[in-house]
Image (cartoon, rainbow, N blue to C red):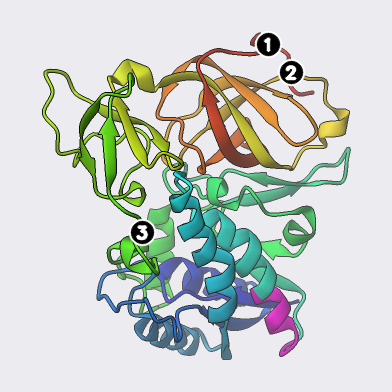
Amino acid sequence: MTIAVGLSGGVDSSTAAALLKEQGHDVIGVTMTHAQGIASLQSYAGSACFGGNEEDDVREAEAAAKAIGIPFYVVDLSKEYEEIVLEYFTSEYLKGRTPNPCVRCNHRIKFDLLVKAFSKKMSFDRFATGHYARIRRDERTGRMILQRAVDRKKDQSYFLSQLRQHQLEQVIFPLGELTKDEVRATAKRFSLPTSDKEESQDFYAGDYRELFDALPPEGDLVDMNGNVLGRHAGIISYTIGQRRGLGISSPIPLYVIRIDNERNQIVVGPREALMKQSLIAQEVNWFYDEKSLTFPISVTSQVRHGNSEHLASIMPQNSENWIICFDKPLAAITPGQAVVCYHGDDVVCGGYIETSLDSSPVQLTNTTIQ
């Protein structure tokens, strides 16, 4: 089998490529560039997905491919990345939302446009990456089910929650059954030059305000009754739940409760005002066959990467929206972020948070997925 592996210049993707070659596959390395000619982009030495020193990442990916003994290619998707990811990123912030560019990039760029563009240059059977996740085929429905990785600390299923069935059909995640320590040890066994490379954790290495053509104006920072407490530096500098950097004094800790882009206001309040019982999700992508389920169903749900899972129930509100109700109120449910529902290790579905609600429109249920 011929497998194209997306090489990022890091230890995970290069180890995935080396393992696949060891298993006897014909492996091809491909790196995506996505920052060429973007005027607002600064160059930083720090490690990040976007805005770091991309030329160094390409050189390191090429060096890894050479060490593994596989051919290496580069595909430039800078124009597409700017239109699909960066414009989404800036427009969401200007709407008072907190975007998740990694989820969008995986769905629309890495596992879509990169695969399509490279398939025009080279013929391959499957596409692999160094993501920590697993895939299984449901024997009853035939659907491809995304699963958590064995290493829960490194699991990246949250960021892959918008992948569609046709994408999962052609994807391989060689690291899904391994821990990070095992990956590092495997990289050293293969003498990969990336074995000790620092991980990329952030979307952008610099100040993300540099990505905006023009910064939004300052405005009023108000309490929940509309009383002006101070001035804010522009709505893109804030997110729900933020406490630091508000520039106001108060006898009690204050947090960002709401971002009102229409009034150009940042609304602050006490921590208890952050607590919400449910949310409405849009663009929900199902891995389970929702038509075969009886709603509401019991799931565990994650509203931010790295956050713990919470018991919840999910049911449709209408043809576009889904309601997720939690067994207890959660803090800082943030519009724009991804929300992912699980059944054990399986990803049931994933969507984007549209809004949070103080109460639960539906009763929690003990109905489990069969």
Quadrant hosting residue 323: top right
Q: How many other residues sit within 10 Å of disc 1, few (<14), some (14-19) or many (≥20)? A: some
The residues tagged by marks 1 and 3 sit, at their Cα atoms, a distance apart of 37 Å
SS at mark 2?
loop
In the image, what residue occupies the spot 64% across and 41% down?
350
The residues tagged by marks 3 and 2 sit, at their Cα atoms, a distance apart of 36 Å
Q: Is residue 84 left or right of residue 136?
A: left
SS at mark 3?
strand
Magenta highlight range: 114-122
Instruction: Name the residue nearer the viewer: 189 or 220.
Output: 220
Q: Quarter of the image for the N terminus: give it.
A: bottom right
- Relative to 100, is 307 above or below? above
Is residue 214 found inside the magenta-colored segment of the image?
A: no
The residue that mark 2 highlights is 296
The residue that mark 3 highlights is 202
Q: Amino acid at mark 2?
A: Pro
The chief SS type of the magenta part is helix
Contact check, label 3 and label 2, Cβ < 8 Å:
no
In the image, what residue occupies the spot 38% across and 42% down?
264
Residue 117 tag number: none
Contact check, label 2 and label 1, Cβ < 8 Å:
yes
Q: Amino acid at mark 1?
A: Thr
Residue 365 tag number: 1
- Give the x, y percent position of residue 256: 32, 32
